[in-house]
Amino acid sequence: MQAEIRRKDRMKNTLFRRGHNFTQSAPIPIKLIEKCFSNDENEAQYALNDLYNLVLSSDFEYFEQFCKIFPYTDFFKRIISLEPCRVRQTALLVFAACSDSDSFPYQEYLNVDILSFLFDLLDRVERDEVTASLHILSRIVMEDPSVSNYLVDQGIHDQMMLLEADENFAIMLAALSITSPQTFKSTIQLIPYCFMTKDGNTIKYALEALLSGIKIVSDFAQPILSVIVNYQSILFDFEQNEITITLFKILKRIPDLPMTFFTPILYKLMNCDTVKILVLANTILQNQQQNWKGVVDEMLCVVLQGQMMGQPYNVQKSCFQTILSYYLWDNGVNLKLTAEVVRFLDDNDVGPKCLFLLCHLLEVYPEESEIREVIESAIPVIENYAASENEDNSNIAQRLLSMIGNGPLS
């Protein structure tokens, strides 16, 4: 779990946005690495610039091959030996990029002296050094959660209050929310800095931090909700599926959502092209049915009917369960929805509800022959319910059979 946040994006490398100019067949530039240790500052800087560009431009396979021969130990010793300068800044960026690899020997960087060196860099004016150190520290934390205790003791949250939020900033918050849940209250206070950037990747990892936190510390549901409410328009404006999915995973865990969430969720449903978002939206709507029912129920059900088309059965059932929760069946006959009720009648989860609803519909609309015809098409399924050992289902089914003229089973 500790490395999940970083690793799941490693193929895309969102942090460094490689352009894939270097592929698996390209040679590994051993001599270029050696030049980075040159005593000639200009030569070292040129070599580091070229090496950094190579790392940025490599695809995943080449990157991993490169990192297998990358001299992590000697490279970091070189960094520590340097006074603050452009060479050190670029070397830190290269090292931070290479820390994303599975070959990164994080165990070598767990001692207090190294952690202290990296933490002190967070107080530097040079943006590149801050970015690189935050990246490296978050990578180490996700591999060894005990490091978060050191960072917390050093005042990582207070230090981050002074930093400009970016993707690395958010990744550190995500790491801390997993490895240091006891400080989650302090972590939440830093999340708005991420949302205010309006940067997709920064927001994505900030939401990951909130999701991890609410999974571990459910008592923080309301503080998390307060943060999301304040930045609701920013979060819902993003069209990145990953952001919407993570946001919805958080919202489904919050018991009482304000009505202001209904419209943006409905809009996401109308424009949804991803099964995960569709299912999560349905879960939220079903959870909030007591609070939200009675607003625009008919429109919601029309949208859900449209989304059911062409979807796998379990997704269709998810949509149908929401329709069951929201549709006002006593406000008029809807043969299309009645047919859907019949279709799900033999489903183990929603079938009993469908059985009760069909009985209710015949009681409310006894003269509607078209409803009767739709229900009659399901007589074999109704008879199975009538013969079942479940007394409640059996009684309802026998009553329904009696109402459509087939009488109770003897």
Image (cartoon, rainbow, N blue to C red):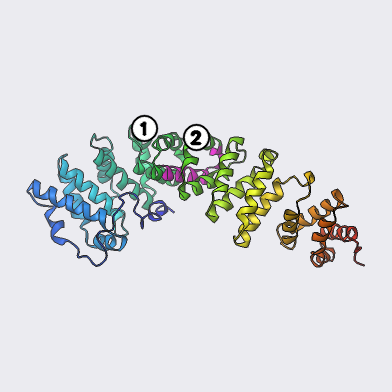
Q: Position of residue 267 (x, y in %)?
A: 56, 43
Please tell me whether mark 2 sits on a helix, a strand or a loop.
helix
Q: Splitting the image into 4 quarters, where does residue 348 fall?
A: bottom right
Which amino acid, by three-letter code, is at mark 1? Met
- Inter-mark Cα distance, 2 to 1: 16 Å
Q: Which residues are magenta?
A: 203-221
Image point 57% across, 52% down: which residue? 278
**Quarter of the picture holding the C terminus:** bottom right
Which residue is labeled 2 in the image? 227
Which amino acid, by three-letter code, is at mark 2? Val
Image point 15% across, 40% down: which residue? 85
Few, some or many residues within 10 Å of mark 1 (<14, 14–19, 20+): few
Q: Position of residue 127 (x, y in %)?
A: 25, 38
Residue 355's place in the image compared with 383, above or below, is above
> Chief secondary structure of the magenta span?
helix
Q: Which mark is in front, 2 or 1?
A: 2
Q: How many numbered dots are placed on residues in this image?
A: 2
**Depth order, front residue of 219/377:** 377
Disc marking residue 161: 1
Residue 152's place in the image compared with 94, above or below, is above
